[in-house]
Image: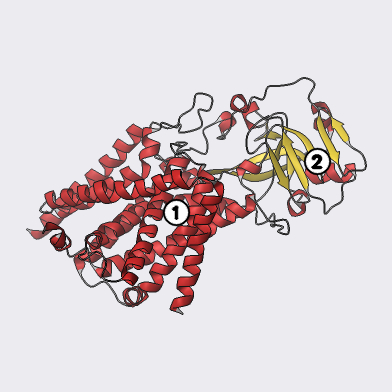
């Protein structure tokens, strides 16, 4: 019976408990970082009513989302190596020794399939390929709980081996060389992609989906004006409405005449790329306080876009009262390109790019 | 302690499955969830095992280079093939990825050859 002997046919000494445990410890660390940064990104975009995220540090989201995406790419060689090392176990015979063993293997199935699912969907998503019948956000988000739950169970079950591996040095030169090769493979993926977020490494990012200097006015965009269906309107008015003493209706020329401020803030995309720009415009705080908004009000910024999940964004007090938060009219010294949100776009510290609403037509105070 | 870890882990799994069910995407999700597993376990892993047998006697630097090249290729494949390009937005996938991949693979190959020659000369 061939099935009973498959596992024994994998003879490489590198497919060993020691190698699997070391790689497992690294994977545990990388999935923990991905889960934490992913939850941060999710709840930054969908905060419960009581949660007021701080607007500082300015670059916090840039760092966490860069870690999430670049770290995720670097996890691919790691996961492949780990699955290679433990692959003979898939063919163990008998497949289930007891009911408990069957449950344990089911958890491993959830862990392996879930880990592959997260990396495959993540890497396709940052390359703008969506071949699946579900929303990426919902599937990637909920699967993260499944993976991390299965990971916790697996770590509890394997804790003795993990502990042994953490406490002992890998003595075999072959195993050390293999682990070093896996680490080098992870490092190589980082080297050729990280520059889309870590701008000093930009020229090395030859296989990154974005270059932080390529786009209209030298800055990438996610949604073009054409895709958003927004065209220049000579009758444009920026409206400030809702719970204010004096509702405002301002032409572009009025906005240009108001006191202008210049700040340096990154645009940090959920897809991992980011780049710091110089923005010039009016402080949202000045505008709202002059209209008579309460300083603890929740504010919604609405775009000229008619459709799309990100045509509005909510902006809570810590962010809109921050002096760095602008309704920007200029980027890097030039008037905003249509693709960057002309006539007016929002720019705030420590928020994902999708919430930096472009083509702002209305600021509504609740 | 073990039961606490198991309980937290199981709760997270239930939260995730419940969330997918509530979104009404469980079936499409399950096809992909199982699909990536089958592609790995039935195609990729056996393929790599066969390739590993073929190259088992090749010089060590060459085997190292093949691991680096293979994992890099898989990790960047959707970017390199770039089916996500869009006419209205040239800032998406803006680089010549095919050429770039060839250059990176050539550098890996050169390093492997250099490593092989150096280790061979050390043995003499």
Tell me if B70 is positioned left or right of A298 in this view: left
Q: Could you say which quadrant of the image residue A300 lies in?
A: top right
Q: Could you say which quadrant of the image residue A238 lies in?
A: top right
- x%, y% of residue B97? 37, 34
The residue wearing badge 1 is A71
Residue in the foreground of this view, choosing between A261 and A41 = A41
Crowdedness near tag 2: few (<14), some (14–19) or many (≥20) residues, C-alpha within 10 Å = many
Tell me if A67 is positioned left or right of A22 in this view: right
Quadrant into which the N terminus of chain A falls: bottom left
- Residue at 46% in and 80% down: B1
- Residue at 42% in and 68% down: A153
The residue wearing badge 2 is A364
Q: Earlier in the sequence, mark 2 or mark 1?
A: 1
**Vertical comparison of B85 with A87: above or below:** above
Residue with the most extreme left position: B124
**Vertical comparison of A299 with A101: above or below:** above
**Vertical comparison of B37 with A252: above or below:** below
- The residues bearing labels 2 and 1 have C-alpha atoms spaced at a distance of 38 Å
- x%, y% of residue A231? 68, 22
Circle 2 marks a residue in which chain?
A
Circle 1 marks a residue in which chain?
A
């Amino acid at each position: 019976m061939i099935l009973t002997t498959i596992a024994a046919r994998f003879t490489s000494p590198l497919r060993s408990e020691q190698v699997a445990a070391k790689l497992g410890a690294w994977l545990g660390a990388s999935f923990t970082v991905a889960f934490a940064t992913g939850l941060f990104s999710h709840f930054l975009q969908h905060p419960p009513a009581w949660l007021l995220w701080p607007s500082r540090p300015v670059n916090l989201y840039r760092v966490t989302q860069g870690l999430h995406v670049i770290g995720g790419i670097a996890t691919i060689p790691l996961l492949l190596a780990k699955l290679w090392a433990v692959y003979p176990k898939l063919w163990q015979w008998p497949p289930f020794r007891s009911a408990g063993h069957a449950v344990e293997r089911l958890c491993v199935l959830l862990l392996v399939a879930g880990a592959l699912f997260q990396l495959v969907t993540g890497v396709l998503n940052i390359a703008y390929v969506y071949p699946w019948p579900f929303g990426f956000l919902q599937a990637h988000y909920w699967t993260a709980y499944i993976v991390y739950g299965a990971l916790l169970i697996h770590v509890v079950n394997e804790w003795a081996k993990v502990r042994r591996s953490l406490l002992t040095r890998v003595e075999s030169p072959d195993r050390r060389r293999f682990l070093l090769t896996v680490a080098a493979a992870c490092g190589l993926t980082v080297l050729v992609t990280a520059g889309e977020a870590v701008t000093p490494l930009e020229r090395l990012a030859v296989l990154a989906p974005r270059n932080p200097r390529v786009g209209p006015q030298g800055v990438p965009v996610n949604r073009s004006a054409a895709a958003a269906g927004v065209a220049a309107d000579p009758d444009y008015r920026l409206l400030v409405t809702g719970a204010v003493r004096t509702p405002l209706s301002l032409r572009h020329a009025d906005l240009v005449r108001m006191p202008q401020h210049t700040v340096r803030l990154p645009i940090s995309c959920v897809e991992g790329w980011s780049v710091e720009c110089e923005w010039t415009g009016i402080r949202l705080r000045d505008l709202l306080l002059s209209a008579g908004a309460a300083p603890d009000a929740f504010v919604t910024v609405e775009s000229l876009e008619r459709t799309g999940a990100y045509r509005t964004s909510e902006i809570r007090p810590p962010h809109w009262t921050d002096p760095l938060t602008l309704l920007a009219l200029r980027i890097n010294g030039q008037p905003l390109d249509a693709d960057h949100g002309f006539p007016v776009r929002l720019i705030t510290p420590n928020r994902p790019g999708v919430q930096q609403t472009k083509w702002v037509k209305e600021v509504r105070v609740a | 302690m073990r039961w606490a870890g198991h309980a937290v882990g199981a709760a997270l799994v239930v939260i995730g499955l419940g969330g997918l069910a509530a979104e009404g995407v469980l079936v499409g999700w399950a096809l992909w969830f199982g699909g990536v597993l089958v592609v790995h376990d039935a195609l990729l892993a056996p393929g790599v095992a066969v390739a590993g047998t073929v190259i088992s006697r090749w010089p060590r630097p060459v085997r190292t280079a093949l691991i680096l090249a293979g994992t890099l290729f898989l990790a960047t494949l959707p970017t390199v093939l770039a089916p996500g390009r869009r006419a209205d937005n040239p800032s998406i996938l803006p680089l010549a990825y095919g050429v770039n991949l060839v250059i990176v693979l050539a550098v890996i190959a050169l390093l492997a050859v250099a490593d092989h020659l150096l280790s061979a000369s050390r043995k003499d």
